[in-house]
Amino acid sequence: MQPAAYLDKLNPQQRRAVEHGVSGPGDIAGGPLLVIAGAGSGKTSTLAHRVAHLIVNGADPRRILLLTFSRRAAAEMTRRVERIARQVLGTDAQALIEGLNWAGTFHGIGARLLRDHAAQIGLDPSFTIHDREDSADLVNLIRHELGFSKTEKRFPAKGTLIAIYSRAVNAEQPLEEVIGRAFPWCAGWNAELKALFSAYVEAKQRQNVLDYDDLLLYWAQMMTEPALAAAVSGRFDHVLIDEYQDTNKLQASILTGLKPDGRGLTVVGDDAQSIYSFRAATVRNILDFPGHFSPRADTIMLEQNYRSTQPILAAANAVIDFASERYAKNLWSDRASGERPLLVNVRDEIEQANFVATRVLENREEGIALKSQAVLFRAAHHSGPLEVELTRRNIPFVKFGGLKFLDSAHVKDVLAVLRFSENPRDRVAGFRVLRLLSGLGPATAGRILDQVNEAGALLPALEAVTPPPRTAEEWPPFLAMLAELNTKSAGWPGEMDVVRQWYEPHLDRLHEDAASRQADLVQLAQIAGGYASRERFLTELTLDPPDATSAEAGPPHLDEDYLILSTIHSAKGQEWKSVFVLNAVDGCIPIDLGVGTREEIEEERRLLYVAMTRAKDSLHLVLPQRFFTHGQAARGDRHVYAARTRFIPPTILNRFAATSWPPAQPVAPGVQAAETARIDIGARMRAMWK
Ligand code: ATP
Ligand code: MG
């Protein structure tokens, strides 16, 4: 075996974290470990080294649980672990790392564990998973059933309802408290909300569907049953988590369930980057970790930033220095050279788009690939004008965050068919599918679904239905398609084609732009090919959908060069040579003009910090003097005049450089000449009549 050369590249603190509890081959112990450190200090990289080091020293990869913020991050981490382990294990590394298949998000891992243990917890393992929109649709269905929408005109909308429910579940807070704190305008509805949520919970169980929150909630509950908890935690020797600052109480309780004494537990995070409190994430998890596992817990701080140049880091540190509550960190970089971040004043968002597109192309001329550049923004719709400009100039891009590929109606339709066939009790899916047929209204659809439910099986129930006259012609092909799915004769991903063929005439009828939607479905079929089974495809896709790409150009191939557009939230953990932050103005960052609570404003500050610390070599913050806001419906969209974000007050302006774009144009000589040789037209006119 080669000596572990990868250890030599680590700094002493990183090395301590990597070697924590590992005394030599086969000799692995180790109490709870917390690595808390600023952006770009190598937390994620240290975690990857630690996993590799554990494996190199004999830990069984199949017994390592690795929790990351996204599926993409998990895949990237696994690749890195393999690269590192290869230095010692050579080609043996590959086979070993294939065993590292418990790497993913809390939700994804939760879904797998729940299916594995379904029988023990009274779940039917063919449960389907509702995304946020499906959950909101189900709540809405129940709201109608209970009559709240009719009698109570100002009853909260479905989006608000599901947000309240989810908050209560994730923060483990009573409903009254959640409403009082975050949704005060709903305070009059306590009783109705309780009735609604209790009906919602019952409906989910009856229909054998789980929403995102259930995946965590059920997992956490499993961990409170001693026998089950032992079975689940007995699967894993090591549990490692990245981005721990963005976990919520439920997730923390899962961890303590998995590793009650903290042995084998490693968590990594940065309190200054906590940006998910709207999903009930709490920075307390990371701050309380040492106390919870005291006196066994070890805390390691990393202080050298390897990502950014010193001027970028200095500016980012200045922004976060004003934060009210955080672990004091002394982050430094030895990459001393480089420009200060540039504040670019532009007239409006059109000019902003122009500027960014121009600069991105200039960068590419200078040898910085599009892929090494990213444009970040606070809200997904902020990139609208830029997307138009990029498309116009044929600059390929991929957009992370915001509207997902799967949110489009036609893609959801196809997925709903698969879900309905998988779990006929899933009412939201059932409604969606039946309503695709001509002449089949909601009342009839509801009745048919009731029959399916009573029969307990899809096909016999549907065969007994007499469809409405206008649906009659479409009914037999519909049943034939479901029958084919039911026998699973087409196999996976062949089933995808079965659905697509059936759906095609409906697509033509329902959508004018059927051709481009057709192309999306071809892409969906390609994605499907990457999964082993229908169930795995539906689960993973619902939990972590692929991102939207530039529509015109279609999705760029992986080896192609493309620019990254991303919400700041989705940019977490990543880095690029050149970063542009759009709309660095009040009203965008922070997103609300003055109405946020103090905590909300602080979270916006951390968001700006996250955005700035993604940059390695060059950072531009663009400030349109006015921006377009999607105002309340009553007022409509309107322009707002903007000021530089409050997080860059005059006292720290010296950390930045500033410019305007386009650069002031010198006045053309011709114009000037005309101005000096002024004629007096009045005198001429008067002269005419003399
Ligand atoms: P974030 O807080 O943004 O998630 P992080 O702390 O996870 O950042 P990483 O992404 O792991 O930081 O590392 C930032 C960069 O620094 C990466 O490019 C990584 O390869 C590099 N890096 C980390 N440690 C070292 C080291 N000891 N020597 C050289 N480069 C390093
Ligand atoms: Mg990281």
Image: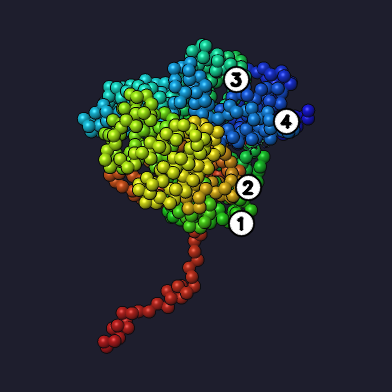
Which residue does the numbered mark 3 point to in the structure image?
Answer: 236
Corner quadrant of residue 655: top right
Mark 3 vs mark 4, foreground winner is 4
- Spatial distance from mark 2 to mark 4, Cα to Cα? 42 Å
Neighbour class for label 3 at 10 Å: few (<14), some, many (≥20)?
A: some
Q: Which residue is mark 4?
A: 92
Q: Earlier in the sequence, mark 3 or mark 4?
A: 4
Which residue occupies 34% across, 24% down? Answer: 455
Give the image location of residue 301, x and y in percent: 62, 27
Tell me if residue 245 can be seen: no
Instruction: State left or right for residue 615 relative to residue 21.
Output: left
* N-terminal label among 4 and 1: 4
Q: Residues within 10 Å of mark 1 (few under 14, many from 20)?
A: few
User: Which residue is disc 2 drawn over?
Assistant: 338
List x then y, in percent, for residue 543.
48, 32
Categorize mark 4 by other alpha carbons within 10 Å: few (<14), some (14-19), many (20+). Answer: few
Q: Are marks 1 and 3 in contact (CB under 8 Å)?
A: no
State the count of labels.
4
Q: Is the residue under label 4 in contact with that under label 2 (CB below 8 Å)?
A: no
First-in-chain label (1 vs 2): 2
Residue designated by label 1 = 365
Which secondary structure, mark 2?
Answer: loop
Name which residue type carries label 4: Asp
* Disc 1 secondary structure class: helix
Residue type, mark 3 in image? Phe
As shown in the figure, which amino acid type bears the numbered disc 2? Gly
Work out which residue is located at the far top of the displayed protein and give it: 226
Which image quarter: residue 264?
top right
Disc 1 or 3, which lies upstream in sequence? 3
214 relative to 369, above or below: above
